Amino acid sequence: MRIPVEWLNEYVPNNLSVRDLAYTLTNVGLEVEAIEDVAGGTVLDITVTPNRGDCLSALGAARELAMALRVEVHDREPKLVESGPNARTLASVVLEDPILCPRYSARVVRNVKIGLSPEWARQRLERCGLRPINNVVDATNLVMLELGQPLHAFDYQLLRCPPGESIPEIIVRRARAGEHLVTIDGEEHDLTPEILLITDPSGPIALAGIMGGSSTEIHDGTVEVLLESAHFDAGTVRRGARSLGLSTEASYRFERTVDPGGTVRALDRACELMAEFCGGSVEVAAGVVDAYPSPVQEAEITLRPARANELLGLDLSAADMAAYLRQLKLSVEEGDVLRVRVPTFRQDLKEEIDLVEEVARAHGYESIPETLPRASSGVGGLPRELAFEREVRRLMQGLGLSEAVTSSLESPESLARLGLPDGDPLLRAVAVSNAKSIDRSQMRATLLTSLAEVVAYNVRRGVADVSIFDLGRVYGAKGPDELPEECQHLGIAATGTMTGGRWAISRGSERWDFYGVKSIIENLLVATTRGSGQFAPESHPSLTEGRAARVILGENVVGYLGELRPEVLVAYDLSEPVFVAELNLELLREHAGGDPKYKPVSRFPAVTRDIAFVLPRDIAAQRAEDAIRESAGGDLESLSLFDAYEGPPLPEGHRNLAFSLTFRRADRTLTDEEVEAAMDGIRVGLKEELGARLRE
């Protein structure tokens, strides 16, 4: 917003230099971005925050300056002479939707003579960035710049009357399908119901709060004028201007809220200027046509001085705060608390905290003392969630995986590629109401879609060896009145070779498989939970049967891993096997262990033994491992499965498992008798618990 310095000085006389004036305005929240010297004066280019529509005028900026300088604004009420019939006998107004247009005020001015505005008026408009047009339109634009209330002038004689009536009727309503309007810039616009219109019985004559129509605009032969001064819903004007690709000085102000109580004063000031600009023949019809079915009331807010001092770090008295607020043109009733009445031009003041901010601005931010915050002297650090995320990221990178950063938005087609059955919970995706395209129209419910897309993207570009991880959020739909469930997951995907074909290793000798991804998960669990977790067979619609497992920690299933089904690979145009895993990072964090503790390495030798036994095929190797650990005693240091066989001569439906066991003590060397006693306990445990048949 551009404001000439001379205009501000008319409202608030002062001896400040231009730079001091700019600094003062910036310090109270009206940032002066530029100071321009123009012919005849200096102009300030001011940035106004979206919540301060009341400052988009010379008077609004002057109020802020007067508050900072602790002086009064030199403001005066318009003076005009009314004559002739009452305006209500010359025009009528109908509000079809008072929510979108709470107030519409109009005056009728007769015997105008279109011509040039005075030199001072044209210069002031040009310095503010507007082009002078004629004395009537210039008067409306000057009032908008002065008071912040956009006005529009219609040629009264071009307005239509309802059938059987003798006076024009102004109708404020939504546009109807198929309507169009040629605006005063000569452009024709197709209208939609989201646009608010000013119409007469013949059809649209203006875009409410945006721009007037050419059919009723002021021209050289205009002699009678109907002046509009209205209050329109900010959101409606914003959406209408955006849909039409129009941005005007009027829409800029309406989008930031205009004072609903200032419509008549703006009309009076415009009529005063028109009488000055057009000569003594101008007649202003008596009264105002004012459609205002539900007047906006002044807000009442309570301010607790003690609370304000606590928030600001000040020690102001209630009287001091009341004086500051009165300087801002607020009415204050003093007592144990301050009861504040907010004028309608301050639509941004709604709660106590807003008044606290006003006290701070009026007192002066530079006058608030600096104090160090009171806090404990504990060392800083990341929050637990971020620290755990950083640890997981470091572990994944240390295990040779590259991080992929993917979008939380996806298309319905991406989820459909996973081959999920009807009724699967993942299909209840969270739709995005303002999606820019179908490709980003819903929130992802699983990381599988993102991982598969990254793998496919790389393979299409000749990168056959891919091993990635992704730390991202997934979203689950809940009830219609509930927010979606949001959770952070860890996703892993791998295909091709692990080594990438190093010179000492023949390509293809170390290809990713189910157990390669499982080893990644095992390392992660050991590092974060100080335990190994458990794996059990899993049935997942996107994973190959028999090559999928769920990951269990305590009583919780924290995720799954496996090989993508051939149908999923085809959907993503992949030909090589792809192995994936997805873990709930928040559940994993709940099982995180404490800081690792040092355990001395025993200086005594270990004793190793092997054991082989036959089990039914449906008994998982994990159960056998658990049975061995329970029966081995405290000297068992580690065990590992090194062989699994099924086929002749074993009975059908059975398999042979072979484990290698390591025994060790920290204080002495184990004897053969002690190790053999532990092995006997293991054999008994396997027979009794699992019905295993031992092999010699």
Image: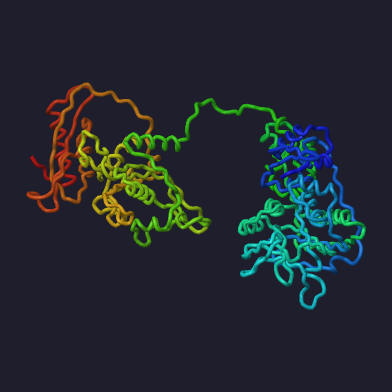
Residue 444 x %, y %: 43, 52
Residue 550 x %, y %: 30, 48
Q: Dividing the image into 4 quarters, which one contains the N terminus?
A: top right
Q: Is residue 306 left or right of residue 156?
A: left
Residue 13 x %, y %: 84, 37
Residue 408 x %, y %: 45, 49
Regarding residue 342, the answer to whether it shows in the image is: yes
Q: Dividing the image into 4 quarters, which one contains the C terminus?
A: top left
**Who's the residue at 73% across and 44% down the image?**
2
Which of 496/67 is in front?
496
Instruction: Examine the rendered structure and indicate whether residue 601 appears above or below residue 35.
Output: above
Q: Quadrant of residue 554?
A: top left
Q: Quadrant of residue 497?
A: top left
Q: Is residue 676 left or right of residue 561?
A: left
Regarding residue 344, the answer to whether it shows in the image is: no
Q: How is the image coloured?
A: rainbow
Q: Quadrant of residue 368?
A: top right
